[in-house]
Image: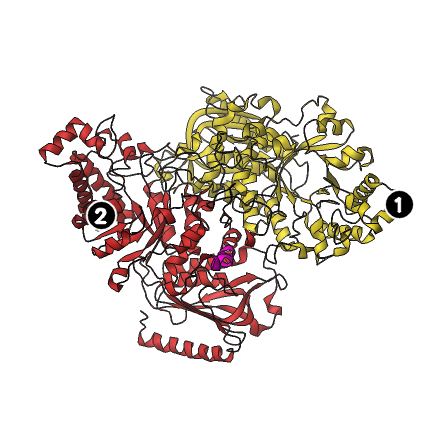
Chain colours: A yellow, B red
Amino acid sequence: MWVLGVTERRVMGAFWVLNLVLFLVQVVGIKGAHGIGEHGVRIWPMPLSVSHGHKSLYVGKDFKIMSQGSKYKDASGILKDGFSRFLAVVKGAHVVDGDTSKLDQSRVLQGLNVFISSTKDELQYGIDESYKLLVPSPDKPTYAHLEAQTVYGALHGLQTLSQLCQFNFSSRVIEILMTPWIINDQPRFSFRGLLIDTSRHYQPLPIIKNVIDSMAYAKLNVLHWHIVDTQSFPLEIPSYPKLWDGAYSTSERYTMADAAEIVSYAQKRGINVLAELDVPGHALSWGKGYPSLWPSKDCQEPLDVSNEFTFKVIDGILSDFSKVFKYKFVHLGGDEVNTSCWTLTPHVSKWLKEHSMNESQAYQYFVLQAQKIALLHGYEIVNWEETFNNFGNKLSPKTVVHNWLGGGVAQRVVAAGLRCIVSNQDKWYLDHLDTTWEQFYMNEPLTNITKSEQQKLVIGGEVCMWGETVDASDIQQTIWPRAAAAAERLWTPYDKLAKEAKQVTGRLAHFRCLLNQRGIAAAPLAADTPLTQPGRSAPLEPGSCYLQ
Amino acid sequence: MWVLGVTERRVMGAFWVLNLVLFLVQVVGIKGAHGIGEHGVRIWPMPLSVSHGHKSLYVGKDFKIMSQGSKYKDASGILKDGFSRFLAVVKGAHVVDGDTSKLDQSRVLQGLNVFISSTKDELQYGIDESYKLLVPSPDKPTYAHLEAQTVYGALHGLQTLSQLCQFNFSSRVIEILMTPWIINDQPRFSFRGLLIDTSRHYQPLPIIKNVIDSMAYAKLNVLHWHIVDTQSFPLEIPSYPKLWDGAYSTSERYTMADAAEIVSYAQKRGINVLAELDVPGHALSWGKGYPSLWPSKDCQEPLDVSNEFTFKVIDGILSDFSKVFKYKFVHLGGDEVNTSCWTLTPHVSKWLKEHSMNESQAYQYFVLQAQKIALLHGYEIVNWEETFNNFGNKLSPKTVVHNWLGGGVAQRVVAAGLRCIVSNQDKWYLDHLDTTWEQFYMNEPLTNITKSEQQKLVIGGEVCMWGETVDASDIQQTIWPRAAAAAERLWTPYDKLAKEAKQVTGRLAHFRCLLNQRGIAAAPLAADTPLTQPGRSAPLEPGSCYLQ
């Protein structure tokens, strides 16, 4: 929804009238881009609507940002920093040493006027991420215009604008081809996630920041941080300071200040952090510091359901989480719970009998207890799909079910009235190195979900970079370009998506090369050959980035 | 040589006396590190001499740089920028939010005094790269001291100091363990190179800068830029503006301003750029813009020896090079020349007969002509070893022979009185993915060279990252950590090098993890298994960085 106050409506009205005139003047040669954009429109992910002309503009040497009429005051500097990053990536690929003052001034764009109607910059699930971008044709006014409801919509607009800019090897300045551009854009889904896993391999802060940068380029907006698992517990928990004794080493740890830095870094780029506490399975490392969380020293997973201390620790962790992880949701895991340690350990087995629970009831009890604690800390909850598959009707209505096992789950979840995030492993697990980018692209979250009210319950999807064979050396080229294929599926309206992946090959290759130009180690699109795998394969032979 | 003026000698004399006293006060527990440093000394590459104590210091919140008594005025900001980078890498791994003002002030280091005796900052082959670093024990003075002949020696000292710093997870500040440190250091070889190849795959500017950053961490000091080859000609040559028509695409090109930016970026980090023009073979791409450089359209390589235009173009390129590439040396290639196109092409064959040359004489003629042109432009020359193997006694005495084919070449080169760079492919080619870091470490450039005057002719060595299967996505993890193994061989005195590679495994793993913490995608040390290769393999399973 585009809601403006009276004053703004007047300002913006004048702006659009002016630009409509400009647009009509330039109408010769203007084309609507029909989704796939293989004929000149190289934007990734493809916007909701794009029109463009056929003239080029230069970006002025002192290209500046203005915010005439904007209600947003940018006290936190989010917009200013975003604009600095915009300039850095646009100018980073080549030395811009041409002199725009010597060029025809009617063809030089002097700046960007950004109009934002919301005064607030809280980043939260479901905020308005839409934007409208107008780059004029070579004539007055000499400003491009970007309007958005929120500063985060404006950041998306800057990303799009950055993709329109390219270095001109003759004039040695940045140019924008095919002006005027009129772009109207908003995401299809509110949750567009990427999971990273810092338990199987520790990822240093600069690497995580680099991943966040690259997510912003593809308009992904949720970093699902699978912090802890069986293998290691790298995060400081002030309430239970021995928990990070489960880290791989003393240096492979994050302080809470590090976590806050990640959240803040992501937030400035319009990306929320979804923290995960995967219970009761996938939690063996907790017991390094507090062995009583294990059923026994010989049977260490899942967490001891019979021990009140277990839930005290979960409460302490979620209390600490709530001070740093401000996203509406927390992820409580709940997947792959093998309960045999509960029946094999005498004191747990005794407790089960006393409470008249069998193993699966105890699993349900644990998950629901954890949900209650999270709700008390103000969170809504994400749980992996096994919780739904086993006792879906018992889950809090504030639960979002995170699909991973396969297709067909989302339709059952939304039919039951719960929300769903789609990550079916056969298509959206990045650690599956034999899954091609084409499969990532074609995976449709709304498959077999036709009712509008049910479709709305699919809040989005997420690609998962599980860390078994992924460390700081290979995380980026395992993520990209396949995550970008999913990012378009999650951003672009269904009708604008390519019906066959091969239609977007050239544009995705262009985006992958753009990532490379920005210092992101995105891998070739890679033909699947007997010698290699589609995920993170090295180029097979010499050649142009655009053809590999 | 350590040459100081009278005033400096006095200042430095006082400095060393003071510190000698401090040193003796702390002598209990002081240890000399014996080369390998597996018992606490984690510096990579290992310095010439290292002594340390057993007390820890904190790095003050406002840790600053001073240059009391220094003759070097840093007009170009090289030292200032180097210090900023030092702070950035030291503080980049974790949020430093501890308050050093609340700590015992006698244990807080307030800054670093840098004393540089040379006023000049020209970076050139053979400059003094030595430095002395003193980190006091917890007592006055509260400054660490770094002295160097040149600012580039001081940059190495900053790299070493950065490796002594680590984040303390209790106090949340940076600490230096095992003070006092007294480090006296200088490189074994003056030429410590890494080759990158931008012809087989274009490498964007941010990627090249990232490689340069990582080279500085390992104290490598020559970026050998193999710019052009058969596959593509990405560099602008103003004298012959159609040469870069041979680029893979219009965007996969470097302007001369880009090249100057790379040179400048490297120079600020103490790294020279050795530009290569590989003639007469490996030059097919030249003919895209100027087809007359080919013997014929059907037989396109090597460059047409019979055409005066060929040498005019080489002259033009080297003229353009000399404005940007200020290193003493230019690399003229000369390897793998298959001359069959010369005999198979009628006009070239005719020319050969007219000049009474057979193919191998024509090859010699070409190389010597190119050498003459380079000499006229003020360069000394590097040529691949085939030139020496075929007509070594004809080469200019200003030639440095670049070994690559195998071992045993260097000894013949220096016996002939020429200088040599060692890059034997069986041990120092990074594109050989089956070569282990241990083999990189153990490759000794002076094998079988015993006479001191001959040893001096081996100016160093270089690891080569040929680009057939290396693009922006995988260059860093194919280079590191194996290049680091060679970097220690080239830096550290022979007597301090480990006699068996396995003795340094832990320290190299530590350095690889340090690279990761600085955002460099260095690969695991990687056991060689049937499933993987030692070069750039992904981690095989979950685990600590330090153990993989």
Q: Is residue B544 above or below residue B366?
A: below
* Residue span colored magenta: B502-511
Left or right: A214 in relation to B145: right
The numbered disc on residue B424 is none
**Rendering coords of residue A479 (x, y %):** 55, 38
Which sits in the foreground, A312 or A293?
A293
Residue B388 image label: 2
Q: Residues within 10 Å of mark 1 (few under 14, many from 20)?
A: few
Q: Position of residue A461 (x, y in %)?
A: 65, 33
Q: Secondary structure at mark 1?
A: helix
Residue nearer the viewer, A322 or B282 = B282
Label 2 element class: helix
The answer to whether A185 is drawn above or below residue B13 in the figure is above
Does the stretch in magenta take in B25? no
Q: Is residue B261 visible?
A: no
Tell me what residue is drawn at x 66 percent, y 37 percent.
A127
Query: Disc 1 residue type?
Result: Lys
Q: Chain of mark 1?
A: A
Label 1 close to label 2 by CB (< 8 Å) = no
The quarter of the picture where residue B183 lies is bottom left
Mark 2, residues whose alpha carbon is within 10 Å: few (<14), some, or many (≥20)?
A: many
Residue A195 is situated, as x and y percent measured from the top left of the image, at: 62, 40
What is the x, y in percent for residue B498? 43, 61
Question: Label 2 marks which chain's residue?
Answer: B
**Quadrant the N terminus of chain B occupies:** bottom left
Nearer to us in this view, A191 or A446: A446
